[in-house]
Image (cartoon, rainbow, N blue to C red):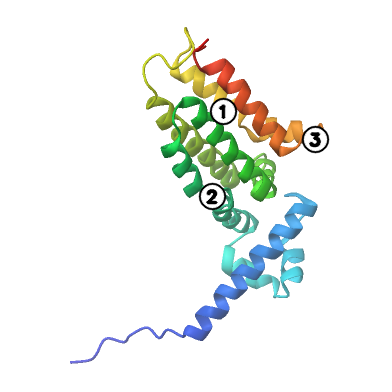
Amino acid sequence: MGQEKRAYRSPRREAQARETRERLIAAARRLFADGGWNGTTLKAIAREAEVAEPTVYAVFGNKAGLAMALTDTVDDEADVATLVAELDAAPGPAHQLEAMARFEKRMYDGAGDIVRLLHEGARTNHDLDVAYREGLSRGDAGRRRVLSGWPTGALRAGLTLDQALDLCSLALSFEVWDHLAHRGWSSDQIAAWATAMLTREILRDQG
């Protein structure tokens, strides 16, 4: 009986492929930050990464595929593990709102360029629009889990859970943070404002 042919794996070739992928992602991030979605071409990214342009297509398929590969770094730079630990350790809803604002600060400070890229590219590219909306949905779902765990009576009188989540979505959105940043606010100031606003508008007055 004939033996089944086994696929050959070359550790060296796999390492080279990973290095090429990482170099392309780093080059794309630099150029996207400078030129935005519309002003950045795959040809320029290939030149920046010192690879042939067909290599970019072979690794990522198209510009949207390359941009979406950058999204993997967003949660890493925002440090989701720290958010989870802070939410678990928070003594009450007000401190959990503060932890959520700190998470957004870390995300926009560390990966704001990637969020901006997705926000810009989503206007004209279906794949990026889907990716951006999925990111928003994950954020909404996470906040819903947190707020749903609050004790009865934590919300301001007359405010529904969905309305509270709407306020969170507004205060913690890229559009609001980007607008205030362009007005000269620091990320610390924006996070403090978001925490204060949400505490005031969502939580029942304890006074």
Nearer the N terminus, badge 1 or badge 3? 1
135 up-or-down from 77: above or below: above
Whether label 1 touches label 2, CB < 8 Å: no
Name which residue type carries label 1. Ser
Q: Which residue is mark 2?
A: 79
Q: Disc 2 on helix, strand or loop?
A: loop
Q: Residue at x 42, y 84 (%)?
A: 9
Crowding around mark 1 (Cα neighbors within 10 Å: few <14, some 14 to 19, many 20+) is: some
The nearer-to-camera label among 1 and 2 is 2
Q: CA distance from mark 1 to mark 2?
A: 19 Å
Say which residue label 1 marks: 169
Secondary element under disc 1, as helix, strand or loop, is helix
- The reply to whether dot 2 and dot 3 touch (C-beta < 8 Å) is no
Check disc 3: other Cα within 10 Å, few if <14, some if 14-19, many if 20+: few
Foreground label between 2 and 3:
2
Query: Which secondary structure, mark 3?
Result: helix
Disc sitting over residue 100 in the figure: none
Instruction: Locate residue 176 relative to residue 205 in the image: left or right.
Output: right
Q: Residue furthest bottom?
A: 1
For this rendering, which residue is in front, 177 or 43? Answer: 177
Point out the image quarter for the N terminus. Answer: bottom left
Say if 184 sits above or below 18 in the image. above
In the displayed structure, does residue 141 sit left or right of residue 110?
Answer: left
The residue singled out by tag 3 in the image is: 182
- Give residue 87's position: percent from left, percent from top: 45, 37
190 to 207, vertically: above or below: below
Ranked by sequence position, the earlier of labels 2 and 3 is 2
The reply, left or right, for residue 182 in relation to residue 155 is right
Q: Residue at x 60, y 75 (%)?
A: 19
Residue 68 horizontal/vertical position (percent): 58, 53
Q: Residue at x 62, y 45 (%)?
A: 106
Is residue 57 visible in the rendered image? The answer is yes
